[in-house]
């Protein structure tokens, strides 16, 4: 009985620590707290991130809970470096075409600027502001701590990520070539001179911006949630425009920070982030499958790739819906391909890659995956292999879940109340998966079909 009580106590400690970390990181991402205090949270909940706790749980027949404690132990080791890079990034600025501007403003500007010279200048400003040696140090320290904790690099995940890239190469290249030519009069790399800032501008799909009005986003989300009985009241969305707030929609636990980019990017981002937050709010952290937030986020954002949904919820004309869905699918496919490429490099870091070799490997991998010239200096932003793997797994799981809903409720499952029971049960189970895990390439292949 004593051992059972001890396990329950540790679960409670783990949940308290995970929730506190999510809240503190949310405050930073939302631009509310430039200097988050993470190390003190680990000190306050020391047992939930202690190597002896992880070992004791493994010995007591609780390996999954022990692995979660070990992962928190890794976070604890690099907490002070994380505090440093977050504080530095909140104050970072770069030299844009009209003078210095904060990192977030530069990131937003490069997706909006039609003049290429100015767009590239905003891209350089964002790159300069994003350069944070403390972030690189945090990733390298995290990699060392993973090795010490016995968290062995999972090379099978890399193999599966490579398979996703291979399966989506042709479809991505063909549609990106068309979009780059029509949006920016450029061609993908390596034959063309499409750069990262150019790619982000192309993927913003500004030509369809009027179809995704700012004022209707919350209304459309509510109309989507109602028949599915999704408890939006559990999710807190902070819709702001603070200088240090990260652009886009970001879920951290049951909270979402939204700094609008404009058009389809906001809709895809908020649908996805709210889906992630709903999954996180449904169960305590120790019961949440790592891929569950990404699964539900991909399922909800995937509705915007559904031509019937676009017609019904956004009044997109049916003759235009295929082109709109294709543009949004291209954006989502880029995100998956970038995650797949970054996963290989992040795993190599766990095996000892570091310094200039790490930065060059990341630049080359992202350039190949994105078909755009990728700058160096961004490797540390893709340093969390577990998160990248969960993103890929979530996209594949979302496709399996979507197919099951179509079989039970028809193509327009999103307005069928019977789907609510399926989704409610899945959320209540923490995203637990009874069947064999789908291969990550399934998520990529589903997006390629949307490009057709």
Image: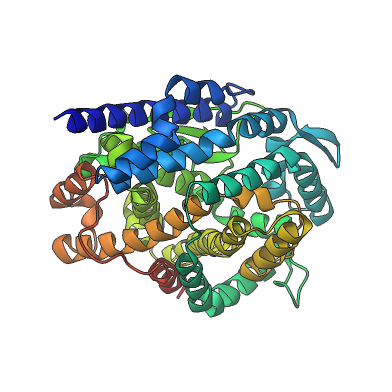
Disc count in the image? Answer: 0
Measuring from the top left, give residue 181's x and y in whole percent. Answer: 68, 70
Q: In this view, does 449 lie above or below 69?
A: below
**68 or 103: which is nearer to us?**
68
Left or right: 302 in relation to 351: left
Which one is nearer the viewer's eye here, 215 or 204?
A: 204
Residue 307, horizontal then vertical, whole percent: 36, 62
Q: Is residue 380 visible to us here?
A: yes
Q: In this view, does 450 lie above or below 138?
A: below
Q: Residue 333, how many percent across, how many down? A: 51, 64
Q: Position of residue 278 (x, y in %)?
A: 32, 39
Residue 223 in view: no
Which quarter of the rendering shows the C terminus? bottom left
Q: Quadrant of residue 428?
A: top left
Which residue is painted at 40% across and 36% down in the image? 52
Identity of the residue drawn at 86% across and 37% down: 98
Nearer the observer, 223 or 54: 54
Q: In the displayed structure, would residue 155 be above or below residue 112?
A: below
Which residue is rendered at x = 70% and y = 51% of the image?
378
Q: Looking at the figure, which quarter contains the N terminus? A: top left
Residue appearing at x 28%, y 34% in the figure:
284
Q: Does residue 81 appear left or right of residue 391 in this picture?
A: right
Q: Quadrant of residue 334?
A: bottom right
């Amino acid at each position: 009985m004593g051992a059972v009580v001890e396990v329950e106590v540790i679960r409670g400690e783990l949940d308290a620590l995970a929730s506190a970390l999510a809240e503190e990181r949310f405050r930073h991402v939302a631009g509310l707290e430039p200097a988050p205090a993470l190390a003190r949270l680990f000190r306050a909940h020391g047992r939930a991130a202690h190597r002896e706790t992880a070992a004791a749980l493994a010995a007591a027949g609780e390996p999954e809970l022990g692995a979660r404690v070990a992962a928190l132990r890794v976070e604890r080791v690099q907490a002070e470096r994380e505090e440093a890079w977050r504080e530095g990034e909140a104050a970072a600025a770069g030299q844009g075409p009209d003078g210095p501007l904060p990192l977030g403003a530069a990131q937003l500007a490069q997706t909006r600027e039609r003049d290429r010279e100015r767009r590239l200048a905003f891209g350089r400003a964002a790159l300069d502001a994003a350069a944070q040696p403390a972030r690189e140090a945090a990733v390298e320290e995290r990699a060392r701590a993973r090795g010490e904790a016995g968290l062995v690099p999972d090379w099978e995940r890399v193999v599966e990520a490579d398979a996703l890239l291979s399966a989506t190469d042709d479809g991505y290249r063909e549609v990106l070539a068309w979009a780059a030519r029509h949006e920016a009069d450029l061609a993908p790399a390596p034959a063309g001179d499409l750069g990262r800032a150019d790619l982000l501008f192309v993927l913003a799909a500004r030509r369809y911006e009027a179809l995704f009005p700012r004022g209707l986003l919350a209304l459309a989300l509510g109309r989507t949630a109602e028949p599915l009985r999704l408890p939006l009241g559990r999710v807190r969305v902070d819709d702001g425009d603070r200088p240090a707030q990260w652009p886009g929609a970001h879920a951290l636990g049951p909270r979402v920070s939204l700094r609008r980019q404009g058009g389809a990017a906001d809709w895809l981002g908020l649908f996805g982030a709210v889906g992630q937050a709903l999954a996180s709010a449904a169960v305590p952290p120790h019961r949440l499958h790592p891929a569950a937030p990404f699964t539900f986020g991909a399922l909800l954002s995937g509705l915007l790739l559904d031509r019937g949904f676009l017609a019904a919820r956004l009044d997109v004309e049916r003759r235009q819906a295929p082109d709109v869905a294709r543009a949004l699918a291209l954006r989502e496919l880029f995100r998956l391909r970038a995650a797949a490429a970054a996963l290989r490099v992040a795993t190599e870091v766990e095996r000892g890659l570091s310094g200039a070799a790490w930065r060059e490997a990341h630049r080359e991998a992202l350039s190949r995956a994105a078909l755009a010239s990728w700058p160096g200096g961004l490797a540390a932003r893709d340093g969390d292999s577990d998160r990248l793997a969960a993103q890929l797994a979530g996209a594949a799981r979302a496709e399996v879940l979507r197919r099951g809903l179509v079989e039970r409720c028809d193509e327009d499952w999103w307005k069928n109340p019977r789907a609510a029971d399926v989704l409610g049960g899945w959320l209540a189970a923490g995203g637990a998966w009874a069947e064999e895990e789908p291969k990550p390439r399934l998520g990529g292949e589903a997006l390629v079909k949307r490009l057709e």
